[in-house]
Amino acid sequence: MAVWGSELLSELWAQVLSLGSEFGDEWDRNDLRAAIFRLLLAWLILSVTAIHLAWRGYGPTVTAFYYRQGPGGQNGGTPEYPSHVNIWESSSTESLKSHQE
């Protein structure tokens, strides 16, 4: 059984290498595709870097804006219960959630 598995694995590996070789040959023949790939890869790296730097600078501000501490609820001004529903009318088994959980 182990011999059959190793033969299958070696055949699969040969197919992967063959596919990789074909891909490499095609890549070498098509300079436009390679140039577009490099351009898009550079754009992706630049975008991810810019997002990372922006989040590093503004992330705490954004997080504080959406997750304020205090009695105002999650968004700072939105109560946990609608104003027309008395808090005592809510389910007694439901505990009040804090933002520190």
Image (cartoon, rainbow, N blue to C red):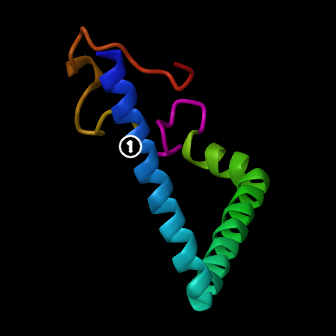
The residue labelled by disc 1 is 12
Whether residue 39 appears in magenta in the rendering, the answer is no
Observer able to see residue 80: no
Q: As displayed, is residue 10 above or below residue 39?
A: above
31 on left or right of 14: right
Q: Would you place residue 45 above or below residue 56 in this image?
A: below
Figure quadrant of residue 57: bottom right
Residue at 66 percent of width and 81 percent of height:
39
Q: Give neighbour class at mark 1: few <14, some 14-19, many 20+ (Cα, 10 Å).
A: few
Q: Position of residue 93 (x, y in %)?
A: 24, 8
- Give residue 92's position: percent from left, percent from top: 24, 10
Which sits in the foreground, 40 or 46? 40
Front residue (pair 40, 12): 12
Q: Depth check: give the residue in front, 19 or 7.
A: 7
Residue 76 on the magenta segment: yes
SS assignment at label 1: helix
Q: How far from the left and from the top, in percent, is residue 45?
A: 69, 66
